Amino acid sequence: MDILRRQFFAHVGQTSPSPLAIEVARAEGSFFYTPEGRRYYDLVAGVSVSNVGHNNPKVVKAIQEQAADYLHIMVYGEMIVKPQVRYAEKICSLLPPKLQSVYFLNSGSEAVEGALKLARRFTGRHKMVSMRKAYHGSTIGPLSMMGSPEADEWKRPFMPLVPGVTSIPFNDFGALDAITERTAGVLVEPVQGEAGVRPPADGYLQALRRRCDETGALLIFDEIQTGMGRTGSMFALQKYGVTPDILCLAKAFGGGMPLGAFISSREIMSSLSHNPALGHITTFGGHPVCCAAGLAALDYLIENNIVEQVESKGALYEELLVNHPQVREIRRSGLLLAVELGDSAKLYRIMELFKEAGIMSDWFLFCDTAFRISPPLTISEEEIRDSSRIILSCLNRL
Ligand code: PLP
């Protein structure tokens, strides 16, 4: 074992008994490379983070320029930080009029935490509803919202969690009665990611919206994985025509840097600024370098019409892979694909074959029978065809 590998296992906190432990020397576009020069297709993109491709020159330039001006000055919300203001203004210009106030944080978990606090504060209620097989982050608030009973394996060792959370099955219209006049917020991914890519049934998000309006509960969309073009529109809320009261963003929102946000109307957001003042604060949230990177990434998506190409790129992957006899089905929203093998032993085996063949994929937290394809949105047609050829050759060896 080389020294770096030994030090990795000795000193870097581990999340599983068998990490991938591939050393990365550099990354560019749809690929990353090991120090020995081995090339991997990155079909995970850091779990839907690197939407504009690795080492995107526009993003790197923005980071360098902002780093040369200033890094951190003062805790969030006290100073006028130009990249924050410009990014907030740009994001709001793309969102419905109800979503015009952005609270920046560092991560997805923090965005969800903030949204939960805002829903409690605005409604004066504390009960929450989440969806089964939903993942919203690993800190105690989002962990409490992780959809039971499937999530109990992850929740039980950390009990007691935040009380008052009910999980309902995603896409079950009959379960909406669980949302009542005592519910503060309903948290939902418009397309469930870690459940193994589950798009909403026709009319489901509209029915959720109606039930929230009837009961006064706030509808919270977790677009941490689906935002920034992943599903073929800039935000899934546009694709499905439903506006939430609070929108959570992270992952690709920072252009490869750590950045999250929850976004609401000015009226709802203003409830956080008094009784008590400083009721939700952050030192690093909306770091200037991260905001500069996120804004550059968003500009890149827009200037190069990347989002408009997502649907056809996702459809091409589907077309190239769906007829293989090992593939049971493909669930897809834009360039977020779950290729269902229907068997976890096969899934573990294909992960090994992928690693040997230079493909980076992954399974899903609540679905270990399907592999993930969520590459940078900048992936070319030729790269989709080439990576599909490699995937098919691995499927042939199952
Ligand atoms: N919400 C969703 C839908 C996610 O997929 C994730 C991360 O995978 C999170 C929240 C948590 O984000 P973070 O890991 O940045 O805390």
Image: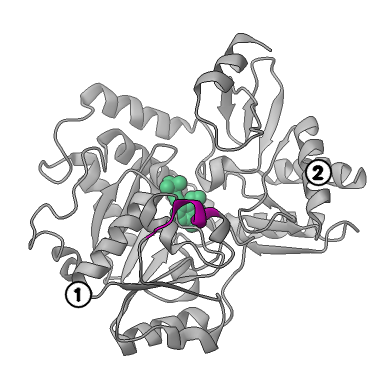
As drawn, 331 above or below 390: below
Q: Main secondary structure of the magenta part?
A: helix
As drawn, the label of residue 105 is none
In percent of width and height, residue 119 lies at 27, 69
In percent of width and height, residue 271 lies at 14, 66
Q: Which residues are magenta?
A: 154-161
Q: Residues within 10 Å of mark 1 (few under 14, many from 20)?
A: few
Q: What SS does tag 2 mark?
A: helix
As drawn, the label of residue 350 is 2
Of the image marks 1 and 2, the number of the one nearer the N terminus: 1
Spatial distance from mark 1 to mark 2, Cα to Cα? 49 Å
**For mark 1, what is the residue?**
124
Does residue 159 belong to the magenta stretch?
A: yes
Q: Quadrant of the N terminus?
A: top right
Q: Quadrant of residue 341?
A: bottom right
Residue at the location (32% across, 67% down)?
Answer: 246
Q: Nearer the viewer, residue 61 or 269?
A: 269
Q: Residues within 10 Å of mark 2 (few under 14, many from 20)?
A: many
Q: Nearer the viewer, residue 118 or 96?
A: 118
As drawn, 357 above or below 8: below
What amino acid is found at the position of numbered circle 1 in the picture? Gly
Q: Residue furthest top?
A: 3
Dot in front, 1 or 2? 1
